Image: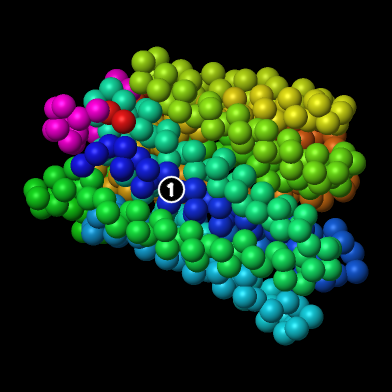
């Protein structure tokens, strides 16, 4: 099977899944806080809305177990098809939901339920998309291949944010709140249909085929994962925590932080986020390719160290002017964090053998995601009490990064020592991409 087709299937589905997930995040501050969580205190309404945002993260470990089980028992492809259906269906239904004014408390309850489904679906998507790429990768290019699905995050975020912003420009504020915000959610049905068609045309990965032919599939993947690879699970959780809090801030809470606490317009905040994501699109494949030559571990450690050193300077500079906000988003999100993220899919997957790779990779990553996803619930009252304090916010980020920095010293250089077998498509004359 052509590698380019596999990579396209991996990243296209990932883009659409993250589009749906981050579309919700963008709509949280703009729409949901007022239409689904009305409260006389705007801060309380915003906090409640961000709680549902965090619930999506909390549900992701559940999805990692469910779809990891399917992925390690039935195949990577089958699991990825199911995650698309779950994400697309829940996003479409969010676009159909009546508001609090129409059906009362049932509205936020239904919203929370659909957000849970989103989180469960995404909990299985990320690991599967990574494995679809890395388990097809030729020798010596696993880092590059593993970085391609990661492009789904910045592309999906920009697409989700842009869709709401575009609709807001075409409608009045009243029209946007009445029906305009629903259009991007309803559009998910078309996008998911396209992704299902693309993924249906690919074959199962060589690694899973080999495990199945040998009869070496795990009976209960989550049990087998902790029986044989518990250390790797905890390594993944710890390594993700440090950059995870900064990631959630830079790609989500920054919109609230910049507008409410720094006094910027929403257009300025969104432009800064877009600049950071656009930079990521360049950084991720470049760093992924470099990791095949200089190693994943050294890039990871250097990235964490730079995030640590620049944490307080970031929060100091973003409040100086829109230009500094743009620059710091490009540097911290688009270059430094993107460099870490470019290597994560590959390095985490290389810690697990094929029979539990989907489950182990997904569960460890999503447990960390569940923890950091509640960052906005911590930062909202923190900002109300301390304001946009560089010491408070920078110190918070530095504490998390310290955990990951220490753990990164004990993780092997997976470019040299990996639990991947030589499951490479043996078509000798096929190009890598």
Q: Residue furthest left?
A: 214
Give the x, y percent position of residue 46: 79, 59
Residue 328 appears left or right of 129: right
Q: Residue furthest top?
A: 294
Image height of 189 relative to 367, above or below: below
Name the image colouring: rainbow
Q: Residue furthest bottom?
A: 103
Give the x, y percent position of residue 13: 43, 51
Q: 204 or 308: nearer the eye?
A: 204
> Is 419 inside the magenta-drawn segment?
yes
Give the x, y percent position of residue 52: 66, 63
Q: Which image quarter holds the C terminus?
A: top left
Residue wearing tag 1: 12
Residue 225 appears left or right of 24: left
Quadrant position of residue 185: bottom right
Give the x, y percent position of residue 51: 69, 60
Residue 356 appears left or right of 90: left
Image height of 196 relative to 323, above or below: below
Quadrant position of residue 97: bottom right
Residue 319 appears left or right of 21: right
What main secondary structure does the magenta stretch of the protein show?
loop
- Residue drawn at point x = 56 percent, y = 57 percent: 20
Q: Secondary structure at mark 1?
A: helix
- Residue drawn at point x = 73 percent, y = 77 percent: 99
Instruction: Write down the region rendered in magenta.
Output: 415-431
- Residue drawn at point x = 26 percent, y = 50 percent: 202
């Amino acid at each position: 099977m052509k590698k380019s087709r596999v990579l396209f299937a991996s990243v296209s589905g990932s883009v659409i899944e993250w589009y749906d997930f981050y579309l919700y995040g963008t709509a949280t501050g703009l729409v949901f806080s007022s239409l689904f969580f009305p409260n006389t205190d705007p801060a309380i309404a915003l906090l409640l809305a961000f709680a549902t945002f965090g619930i999506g993260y909390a549900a992701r470990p559940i999805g990692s177990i469910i779809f990891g089980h399917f992925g390690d028992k039935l195949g990577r492809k089958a699991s990825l098809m199911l995650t698309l259906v779950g994400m697309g269906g829940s996003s479409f239904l969010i676009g159909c939901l009546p508001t609090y004014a129409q059906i009362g408390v049932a509205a936020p309850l239904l919203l929370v339920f659909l957000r849970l489904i989103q989180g469960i679906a995404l909990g299985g998507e990320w690991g599967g998309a990574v494995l679809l790429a890395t388990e097809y990768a030729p020798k010596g290019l696993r880092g590059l291949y593993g970085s391609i699905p990661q492009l789904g995050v910045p592309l999906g975020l920009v697409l989700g944010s842009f869709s709401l912003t575009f609709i807001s420009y075409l409608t009045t504020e009243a029209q946007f709140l009445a029906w305009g915000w629903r259009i991007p959610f309803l559009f998910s049905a078309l996008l998911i249909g396209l992704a299902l068609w693309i993924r249906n045309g690919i074959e199962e990965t060589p690694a899973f085929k080999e495990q199945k032919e040998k009869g070496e599939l795990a009976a209960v993947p989550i049990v087998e994962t902790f029986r044989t690879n518990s250390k790797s699970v905890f390594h993944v959780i710890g390594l993700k925590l440090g950059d995870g809090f900064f990631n959630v801030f830079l790609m989500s809470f920054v919109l609230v932080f910049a507008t409410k606490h720094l006094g910027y317009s929403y257009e300025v905040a969104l432009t800064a986020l877009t600049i950071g994501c656009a930079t990521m699109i360049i950084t991720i494949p470049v760093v992924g390719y470099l990791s095949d030559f200089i190693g994943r571990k050294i890039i990871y450690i250097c990235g964490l160290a730079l995030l640590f050193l620049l944490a307080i300077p970031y929060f100091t500079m973003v409040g100086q002017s829109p230009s500094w906000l743009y620059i710091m988003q490009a540097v911290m999100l688009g270059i430094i964090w993107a460099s870490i993220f470019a290597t994560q899919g590959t390095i985490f997957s290389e810690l697990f053998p094929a029979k539990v790779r989907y489950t182990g990779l997904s569960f460890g990553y999503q447990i960390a995601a569940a923890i950091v996803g509640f960052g906005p619930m911590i930062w909202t009252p923190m900002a109300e009490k301390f304001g946009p304090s560089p010491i408070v916010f920078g110190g918070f980020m530095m504490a998390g990064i310290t955990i990951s920095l220490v753990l990164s010293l004990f993780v092997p250089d997976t470019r040299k020592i990996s639990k991947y077998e030589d499951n490479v498509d043996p078509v000798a004359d096929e190009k890598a991409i």
